[in-house]
Structures are given as structure tokens and as C-alpha cells.
Amino acid sequence: MAASQVLIDGRTLSIESLILIRDGLATATLSNEAISRMQTSRKAVEDILDSDKIVYGINTGFGAMSSVQIDSENLAKLQLNLIRSHACGVGELMSPEHVLMMMVIRANSLAVGNSGIRVEVVQTMLELVNARISPTVPRIGSLGASGDLAPLSHLALGLVGENDFLIEDEEGWTLIDASDAFGRIQSSPVSLQAKEGLSLINGTSQMCTFLSEAVSTLETLVFSADCATACSVEAIKGSHKAFDSRIHAARPHMGQSISAARISALLADSDINRSHADCDRVQDAYSLRCAAQVHGPVIEALQRARETLYIELNSATDNPLVFIAEDGASEVISGGNFHGENLAIIADNLAVCAHELGSISERRTNLLMNPQWSGQKAFLAVEEGLESGLMIVQYVSAACVAELHHLANPASTTNISVSMEKEDHVSMGATACHRLLTCCEMLSRVIANELIAAVGCLRNISEAPGTGVSTIFSTINGMIPALEHDQSLSEVSDGLALELRFGLLHDL
């Protein structure tokens, strides 16, 4: 049973609220204020229909055919044709959890009150969300401009009863037909009226879905990277001095200071550090000594991404938009709020950030394998030469970094003109944002491998590490088998990576 309620008001939707709904921990409800705004904008559309005005998106064709006027008796058919013709996505299906998030984001955008859609259409969408019923939506098809047309059209096709659905039950997600889906919510498919099809499919909802989850996951992983760094510092009996607050106050970048403070706190009260207070090692390798300077910019990039995403989640992103003046006069204006350039650029930047976190983590893993740094046997092999120990764990991290390097190539620099040159610049934001989810998975594997190696080293050190590192060690030690002989660690690495993505270390 859902533990909380998310108010869909077009103003306050957050990443955290979306994650709660994704995980079935909250339901979504339209606010009274949103209902009032939507009713006002819908009346403006109906007034246009009662007049002789010709307005794009209401009684015209779309895209390159926007100059074609449509007779009033064909307006409902126009909207249905729009949905059917645009629902031509391909590839694997979006996960139903992502589709539920996309539905909530679309509903919240419509709740801003500039879209001219009827309240009951959005209510039906939210009823499906709350019942954990998701239309089937192919992932591929959006160019990140003119909105996420293809995926949102498949969503809309579900609302009109012409699509299959997935419903969550005790055994997972089960395929059902439209009649069953609407029977579960005791409702009927939507009969689209003027402008409503366009309002449903014109927006950045798929992009926002992927980016919301990616930002949340990357915030978790950059914290995990700080945790891994602290473990690696202790594992090679490295210096704590690089995380001294005075160093970071002398170069007061916010993210750098946060990362250094986290690492320093995890290292506090370390017997390992006290045991080598008089050693002759002056400086550690950059992957340790400069960790805060590398992790810090990622923290800052994530903060900026979160700020931009919050604005986007609570914006009207379809076209055209309906505006009501104080005197009650209305105007319908065509623009480009559906263009996902802001999201594409953020996702491209965060893909680079994921690469950098992975790159420096792999370098720390390499140090842990090296007797000159760790003071332990090469690759932590029990019988050097006869056994390879964790040698290939580092190879796998290097391979993951190569994948991250490839994934860091920007999607936003690709432009393919469509719709007879009417839509001649697109963002490829959906490609960029979905790619970032793949980056998160790859990064989590690199950090997991660093932690596996660090735990292997710490097991062989008699002194106690810092208090925070001790807590991390206790949390993950049982997930890693004794490294007393060569063995496959694939499942261990993937299992730990998954736990990291779900926040294993985030609440320590």
C-alpha cells in the first residue's frame, strides 16, 4: 500500500516524488488549483472552437501541414489520427516503472494550466498510475524536439484504449489488454477532443524520466565514490592530509569541499593512519590525493542538473500554449518549449562526469593491485604466479571505463532535420538521457570493483581503519567471499554494483 501522496499541481514535482511513485510508495493526486487552471485553459480552447478563428494545434494540421485547416466535424478524428500515426516507436519496451514516471511528468506539465486539455483526461492517466497499470511503450523514437512524440503517442494510444498494458501484481508485471486495464480502474478509454492529442504527446516527459532517475542514481554513486576513496586510502595506508579542510578552503569550490569533508569524516579516528604516522611517504598518487578535486565538479554538475530538472518537471512543455490575461481574454501562442536542448546538454555533461568518476576509480583499483602501493602481494593473490588473484577485476574496470569513454560522446551534437525542414534542429535529448542510465550502470561496476579490492586489502591489515571506513567494511564485507583462492567474481561485482545504485552506502 502506498505510504504517501504526491500532489500534482504543476509547481512542486520533485525527483524524490517521482522515485516514490516509481517504487509504488506514493500515489498521485491532482490539486484543486491545478484543476481550476486546467478548466480555465480548456474553456479558452472551446471558445476558439465556437468562433471562426483558425488556430494551430486546435483546428489545423500539424508540423509541415500546419497551414491546412480542419473542419469542426473532423477535429476529434484529427486528434486520434495524430496519436495513431505518431505511435511508431521501435526497440525494446520502456520499463513499466519508467512509463509510470513519464505519465506523472506529463500529467504535471498539463497541470500547469497552459495546455487546454480536459481535467478528466489527466485524471484517467493518474488513475492508471495509482493502479500500477502502464501502457506498453517502445523506447526508441524521440528526437528530443517537438517533444518525445513517439513514446508519448504510445502512452496516449493506451489512454484511448488502443494499446496493451502491463499491470504489477505479486509476481511482477503482467500483460493485459485495454479493456481489462480500464476495468481495473472502473473507467473507460478517453475520447480525445480538440487539441488534446497534441497536448499529450508534445513535451519532454520521456527525457525527464530518464534524467530524473539518472541524476538520483549518480548522486548516490558520487557518494559511493567518496566512500571507495576513503577505503582505498586506508587500504594502501595512504595519507589523510590531502583532505585537510584548510587545503579546500584555500580553493573554495563547493563540490570539492563537500567531497573532501566526506572522505575526511570517513577516515576519522583511524588506527591505520596512526600506525604509519612517521613513514617516509610524502604524497600519494593523484587518484587518491586529487579525488576531491575530481569528485567535486561532479557534485556541482549534479546540483545544477537538479535545479534545471526541477524547473523542467514543473513547466508547460507542449505547443501551442494557451494564455489567459487578467481581463479573461485568451491567446494561443506557438513556441518551442518542447525542445530538450537543456536536458540533452546536461545529460551529455553528466556522461562525461560518469566517465571521470569511473576513470579515477579504476586508477585507485590499480594501486590496490600493486605491491609498491599496497604493501601486499600482487593482485592480492595468495600464491603469486600460481594464482592471478584480482588481476582481471582491474581489467574489467578498465573495460568498463572504455565503455564509459564511448558513452561520453555527446548526443546533442547530432542533428537530423525532419518534417520537411520545419523541424530543422533537434536535441537528441531522449538518446542522451537514456544513455546516461547506461553510464550509471557501468560506473557502479567500476566502483564496486574498487570496493572489492579495498576490502581484500583491509582484511590483511591488523589495525582498524577510520570509523566510517569500518562501517563501510562491515556493510559490504559479507557480500565478498574470502579471497583465499582464485574464483569468479562476476556475480559478486554485479550484485554489489546493483546495491550501490540502490543506495547501499548512501545512508551510512
Image (cartoon, grey):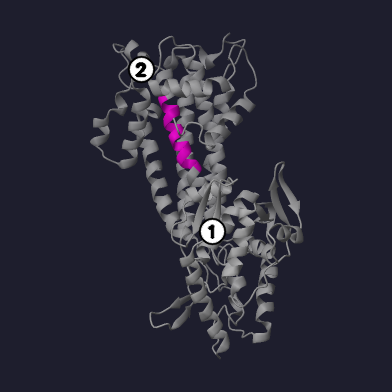
Q: Is residue 347 left or right of residue 180?
A: left
Q: Is residue 482 left or right of residue 281?
A: right
Instruction: Please say whether residue 459 is one of the residues in the magenta stretch.
Output: no
* Whether residue 325 can be seen here: yes
The tag on residue 270 is 2
* Whether residue 428 can be seen here: no
Lower position in the chain sequence, tag 1 or tag 2:
1
Tell us which disc is closer to us: 1 or 2: 1
Q: CA distance from mark 1 to mark 2?
A: 50 Å
Q: Residues within 10 Å of mark 1 (few under 14, many from 20)?
A: some
Location of residue 184 (image quadrant): bottom right
Indicate the secondary structure of the residue bearing disc 1.
strand
Residue at the disc numbered 1: 29
Nearer to the camera, 381 or 153 = 153
Location of residue 71 (image quadrant): bottom right
Q: Residues within 10 Å of mark 2 (few under 14, many from 20)?
A: some
Amino acid bearing label 1? Thr
State the quadrant of the C terminus. Answer: top left
| Image vertical order of residue 408 relative to residue 105, above or below | above
The tag on residue 432 is none
Nearer to the camera, 77 or 230 = 77
Q: Position of residue 66 (x, y in %)?
A: 58, 80
Magenta region, residue range: 217-230
| Image vertical order of residue 369 relative to residue 397, above or below | above
Amino acid bearing label 2? Ser
